[in-house]
Amino acid sequence: MKSKSAEKAEKPLQWWQLSLLGVACTIGTGFFLGSSIAISMAGPSVILSFALAALGTYFVYEALAKMTIADPQKGSFRSYAKKAYGRWAGFSSGWVYWLSEMLIIGSQMTALSIFSRFWFPGIPLWVFASIYAVLGLLVILAGPKGFDRVENLLAVLKIAAILMFIVLAIVALFGLFGGGTEQNVIPRTYDGFFPNGISGFLPSLIFGFYGFAGIEIMGLLAVRLKNKQEAPKSGKVMLLLLAVIYISSISLSLIIVNWNNFNPDQSPFVSALNNYNIKYVQDIFNGVFIIAGFSTMVASLFAVIRILVTLAEDKDAPAVFSKRIKFEIALPAIVLTTGGIIVSIILSIVMPGRIYEYITTAAGLMLLYNWFFILGSYGRLFEQTTMDNIKRYLGFALVLLAVTGTMFHHTSRPGFYVSLVFLIVIALVTFIMQHMWKNDPEGDEKAIGTLFTKLK
């Protein structure tokens, strides 16, 4: 059980504070860098990708929020999966999420490294990745104090940066900065809006969804709301804000620069501003992107450690990972997570070039697999109205569309296969664990401990 000191360390939240924390956990490299990859795939239709992703994400979050209102659980989605389908679902959901967030941390470190090479092009990616990993772990080791305040401050900074770009882009379009030699026309035909056809549009959906990834962390934090009934409001405000600033900023970028002139390794905002004579703005935005990516990386670290602790407390991971030392630091869980980070850095060494696309796709898919659990759990645990079912099935359809869309592009296809490999491994481990649980009806943690020993 959670200690009293830990309970006191986590102060209750107002609905707007949860919205702000959601923004902090969401706006990061998935949008600032992943949107360039999506633009190179889909062209102007990337706007539709982000709009559909926002809609699908809202359906998933609404289901999660309603379950939180009815039955607040610190394990959030994995606790609901366990109640809906049994222990196997809670076990597999928790570990799928842990692995997906580890992949996300790897993609974030790679993206942060790419941004850093904007200033230091001669330094290898893995060097920057190692530095950011150490800094992120130091923030976690500092304990829970100040986490909310820092993340809220970074959320405001990230929103301000995007709004600054929107203002600068509008002013630049009026010719006040000079430059701007490209004359782009807003597409009015099917071929103009879908230059690469549906086969180009579908694989971009995963990057749209990845731009909204973070609702699971909101679910983990929603139990701290003073008024649990306000959980849906927090998600609505957050997702509406993100959808507006995402679509507005990308649309302006596409007006300033032709879609096929974007560099997949560079933020679309930097590419757009390079078209004008604005001194130092690129450097300022690049610094903001690094701060944004670092904040989401720290949020991911928080999430994987929290989910690992709840797995251990639920006897679905070795009990040692629920142990805390001074200042409520879950050191064993941090150590295991550090091992996962080291693996991510090694991958960045042995898989240069396309590493970001592969890891981002795999991470996004792993998250979406868990979203299936959220929608399924909601339908199984609660009586559904006709409108609830419509939203739930639309959510299923949009998520499935994003998953299948990755098969239509050569850069996203390997990420799909990577996610399947991890999914198969977890399924096999779950199958083995089910056999152990049958021989251990009380669910003693010795079963999972024995399995981890064998895996070593």
Image (tube, rainbow, N blue to C red):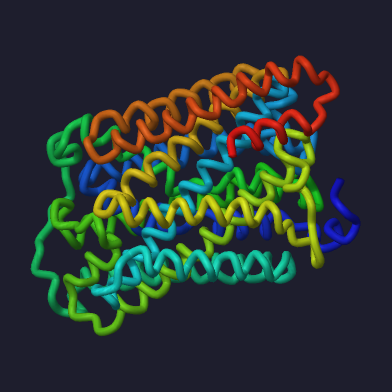
Image quadrant containing the C terminus: top right
Give me the residue at 30% from left, 50% from top: 351
In this view, 225 is above or below 393:
below
Q: Quadrant of the rendered structure where residue 382 is?
A: top right
| Residue 428, percent from left and from top | 55, 22
Image quadrant containing the N terminus: top right
Give me the residue at 39% from left, 64% from top: 112
Q: Quadrant of the rendered structure where residue 446 is?
A: top right
| Residue 60, percent from left and from top | 56, 34
Which is nearer the eye, 56 or 76?
A: 76
Give me the residue at 74% from left, 69% from top: 145
| Residue 268, percent from left and from top | 27, 60
Residue at the far bottom: name it: 279
Q: Is 397 placed left or right of 222 in the picture?
A: left
Number of marks: 0
In this view, 152 is above or below 92:
below
Q: Is 238 placed left or right of 130 in the picture?
A: right
Residue at the far right: name it: 4
Q: Is 94 placed left or right of 213 in the picture?
A: right
Which is nearer the eye, 310 or 154?
A: 310
Give me the residue at 35% from left, 38% from top: 415
| Residue 228, percent from left and from top | 78, 44
Q: Quadrant of the rendered structure where residue 43 is?
A: top left
Camera sees residue 397: yes
Camera sees residue 388: no
In this view, 7 is above or below 125:
above
